[in-house]
Amino acid sequence: MADTISISPSAGLAIASGEIRGACPHDCPDTCALLTTVEDGIAVKVRGNPAHLHTDGTLCTKVSRYAERTYHAERLTQPLKRIGPKGAGRFAPVAWGEALDDIAARLQAIARRDPQAILPYSYAGTMGLVQSESIAARFFHKLGASLLDRTICSTAGGEGLTQTLGGKVGMKVEFFAEAGLIVIWGSNSITSNLHFWRLAQVAKRNGARLVCIDPRRTETADKCHEHLQIQPGTDAALALALMHELIANDWLDHDYIAQHTLGWEGLRERALGWSPERAARVCGVPVQQIRDLARDWGTTTLAAIRLNYGMQRVRGGGNAARAIACLPALTGAWRHRAGGLLLSSSGMFPVDKTALQRPDLLAGRQPRTINMSTIGDDLLRPASAQFGPAIEALIVYNSNPVAVAPESGKVVRGFARENLFTVVLEHFQTDTADFADYILPATTQLEHWDVHLSYGHTDVLLNRPAIAPLGQARPNTQTFRELAVRMGFADTCFADDDEALCRQAFAGHVDFDELLESGFASLQVPDAPFAQGGFPTPSGKCEFFSERLAWQGLDGLPDHLPNYEVPGSSPHYPLAMISPPARNFLNSSFVNVRSLRDIEGEPLLEIHERDAAPRGIVTGGVVRVFNDRGEYRCKAEVSTRARPGVVNGMGIWWRKLGLDGTNVNQVTSQNLTDMGRGPVFYDCLVEVQPV
């Protein structure tokens, strides 16, 4: 298959006819290879590339509508300048040159006082290495702006995995198809990891047992042989009880433990303190379920865990990931290519972040770091010796913090400050864009170059532009290049074009000609990467005990840490709440695609009959969900998808599309996880009343 491409000198991007190879940019472990059919310069269809093993010609419902999103009637195609009060969403068109001149002047004035008063705010609106943190990172490093701690999704689990296995590493996803037992832990795979789910179905047809561990009875739980519907935040207790049973029944690979692990005696002592009975009381599941799962894990040679990030959005999320990551080493599951664990494969990719982001441009400066998960508090902080200067300017790209950041009442108050200068690079006028001083139209994945790693498989993917940018939309890279010129940044690295940046990302490790030819290239990773140990930890072993954590004054062994907000601890807020993503959205992306929103319906709270009946709550009724941090209103669905005592606030809807202009994050907190400084979205107590 050959791409037919002609070059548009005015846009500097490709206008194509035929099928153009690309990659899905969204925050999903599958990182699919795309084929975009273009006719007369218009993208008429986006489909999965059948030549790519992991995509196999199939896309999720969301991304199969990518052309609809690209040509959406509300797509931003020209720069806009605010003409109304902050948050009112009133803007007027402005020329690119005028907008960039004013933005640069405003940033220069602030930087003369203290560049740390300027903050970038971005995350995974695109997972591409080029359109996320390449020219943008260079720009903010050269400026000396505050650094952003990008924590909002996965840092607790990532840190837990790193402390135990040495990095975001694990088994190769394709070999789940050969497993005899698959434990799907904290993941609604049908919704958020579709291509893994297809592998799990292959294994199931071949006789594998599928077990789901999740506080919600998800669509995935419906299709598994067993569902452990645990209380939110009790995953480490369950993992320790499984270890207890492995030890008590001697379902252990003593040779693997002796050769390839560190800290076994300490872990053994801790696990023996967690009987199945104790864990059952904490987790809220039957004792026999714990015993049965331990037996299955301990007696199945090809046993594998597909761990996902839902379980680490609580106070003890890092410890939970650590405890779960110990399980494969105890039974020697790593010896086999169809055994072990996968949370993220991103640590296997040899990305040259130094070349892309150029931290040397800081020139010895050490700006402060702001945690994106506490942006609500930080935007409201005055200048102080401890905090530094108040935040005076915010440049938002690849994120929608007003909708997705916790305790959004404070986030809104911060963004509403008249003395906060805000620039938003976006495809649509999101909740965050409503508070901008300038909105700059960004290109979508069909309109620019990019290169991608994956956190669910081990292939690098290249994205070619399939169509010219719509209207006056520009790639993020181009916007930051032009700002750099106006700021007087003369470093030659700001002239690197997007294809050159794609080449820099994996230079010396991945054949770029292969990427150009096929659209993807596989890393050379052993089928069973830890069969003989060789973990990327300091010791080269699976570290049950982490000296690095001990040096920080933390517990070197994994343990169960109760939630900040434990059910039963508050007489006013008796219900725990988790906020899993709605099936047809991806975080706050796709919420404005009408065909997907029509499928999803409206903001919804799932509540069990046992909690609904005494409150007079019925399906379809409007309820008020509240705690001391705030409240929001939505429709209720009385459902066994919620366990008694836990409600599921399905997210993440744009606030402006909610019943009262808010969403579920009105009630979540800015507390942080035990390690990784991540948010605790699923560590939240509320009360629910009918309206």
Image: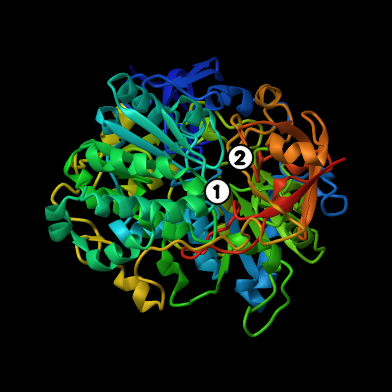
> Which residue lies at the image location 36% right of the left edge and 60% below the top edge?
354
Q: Nearer the viewer, residue 166 or 110?
A: 166
Coloring scheme used: rainbow
- Callout 1, which amino acid? Gln
* Residue 341 lies in quadrant: top left
Quadrant of the rendering where the C terminus is positioned: top right
Please provide percent x and percent y for residue 286. Answer: 47, 43
* Image marks 1 and 2: residues in contact by CB distance under 8 Å: yes
Crowd around label 1: few <14 · some 14–19 · many ≥20 (10 Å): many
Left or right: 373 in relation to 223: right
- Residue placed under numbered mark 1 in the picture: 231
Tell me residue 140's x, y (percent).
54, 63
Answer whether residue 404 is visible to the viewer in this image.
Answer: yes
Is residue 98 among the parts visible in the rendering? no
- The numbered mark at residue 643 is 2
- Badge 2 element: loop
